[in-house]
Amino acid sequence: MSLTLTVNGAVTRLDPAPATVAELVRALDLEGKRIAVERNGEIVPKGRYASTGVGPDDRFEIVAAVGGG
Amino acid sequence: MNAPADPSTLADPLVVAGRPYRSRLLVGTGKYRDFAQTREAVVASGAQIVTVAIRRTNLGQDANAPSLLDALPASEFTYLPNSAGCYTADEAVRTLKLARELLDGHALTKLEVLGDSNTLFPNVRETLKAAERLVADGFQVMVYTSDDPIAARELEQIGCVAIMPLASLIGSGMGILNPWNLRLIIEQSKVPVLVDAGVGTASDAAIAMELGCSGVLMNTAIALAHDPVRMARAMRLAVEAGRDAFLAGRMPRKLYAASPSSPTSGLIS
């Protein structure tokens, strides 16, 4: 079963469907990276990745620190 | 190395949000060729506080690719995430909240809300709105702003921990365009005032410190120098020299009134 989400502005189909944010982060190869996750406009704290569900048509922003002034 | 020093050994620390720092030079991490050059320049600058931007992470990239924070670890540096690229208070607050989450609750933050994509001039009204919300939410806000002393005063009254007026436009290297306004802001402020934006070369940084700034924040001046590492070193020295000159108390200017340094008596004839 797959799930269609928007991640960082791009419509993404994930198969198998991640049930939680933790599974999404793992599926995107971002586990253990220094990131922050926003789901439908709300920040999901790292401690709640495993307990936050992922639903169809969810919009995610996943950010990292980059060079800047 | 660049890690926060033992406060009792610092003779003249920069104190921001109650925390002392040896270095009064803060640097950005953008515009470098790669992370190796970024690190080399930042280390040469002696900076302890480094700004970072917050952007969408690249998906589908090599999971083992090094990141900026690997090159500049938290054990050596204090991060100052910025809201660069934001044009509204909402965007800035949203970005800085994400930054705080990314950095495990790190409260120190650089607020920047732009009003124009060509000049990158700050939108002071949106900056004030964002500052109020961020301070209320427990952030320690170092705020980039124009050199308007009234705006600076209002930002301080809101509770920003540092006021950072531009010297000139971001990335322009035009130096300090209005030392008079800068001086007004310095004289009225109880929190540190740091010049942020527009520094082009070492003398600009020295002048900022001689005016009484608590510190200087720069990025392009180092990153786009022909020899960034050498310029980073020059900036380190310039900030120290300017600070020493300020603390030494300069001689008065005497317009058109010369006075010889050598004795006027005992001349042979």
Image (cartoon, coloured by chain):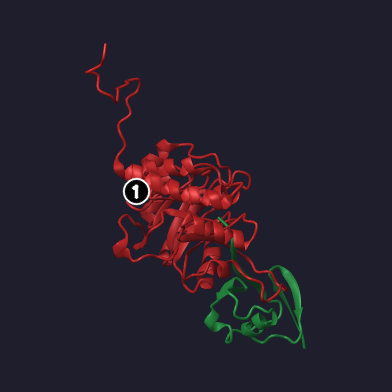
Residue B234 x, y percent position in the rendering: 49, 47
Q: Is residue B185 left or right of residue B54?
A: left
Identity of the amino acid at label 1? Ser
Q: Secondary structure at mark 1?
A: loop
User: Relative to residue B261, is residue B57 depicted above or below?
Assistant: below
Residue B177 x, y percent position in the rendering: 49, 37
Residue B57 visible: yes
Q: Residue furthest front?
A: B268
Q: Nearer the viewer, residue B89 or B140?
A: B140
Residue B83 x, y percent position in the rendering: 54, 59
Q: How many marks?
A: 1
Q: Nearer the viewer, residue B79 or A7?
A: B79
Q: Quadrant of the C terminus of chain B?
A: top left
Q: Quadrant of the N terminus of chain B?
A: bottom left
Q: Chain of mark 1?
A: B
Residue B91 visible: no
Q: Is residue B37 left or right of residue B127?
A: right
Query: Based on the displayed image, in which of its 4 quarters is residue B33 positioned?
Result: bottom right
Q: Nearer the viewer, residue A41 or B260?
A: B260
Query: Based on the displayed image, in which of its 4 quarters is residue B139 positioned?
Result: bottom left
Query: Quick one: label 1, few (<14), some, or many (20+) residues within 10 Å?
Result: some
Q: Identify the hue of chain A.
A: green
Residue B141 x, y percent position in the rendering: 43, 59
Q: Nearer the viewer, residue B231 or B267?
A: B267
Q: Which residue is mark 1?
A: B189
Which residue is drawn at the image coordinates 62% and 56% (left, top)? B32
Q: Identify the hue of chain B.
A: red
Q: Is residue A59 left or right of residue B20?
A: right
Q: Is residue A49 left or right of residue B217?
A: right
User: Relative to residue A58, is residue B225 depicted above or below?
Assistant: above
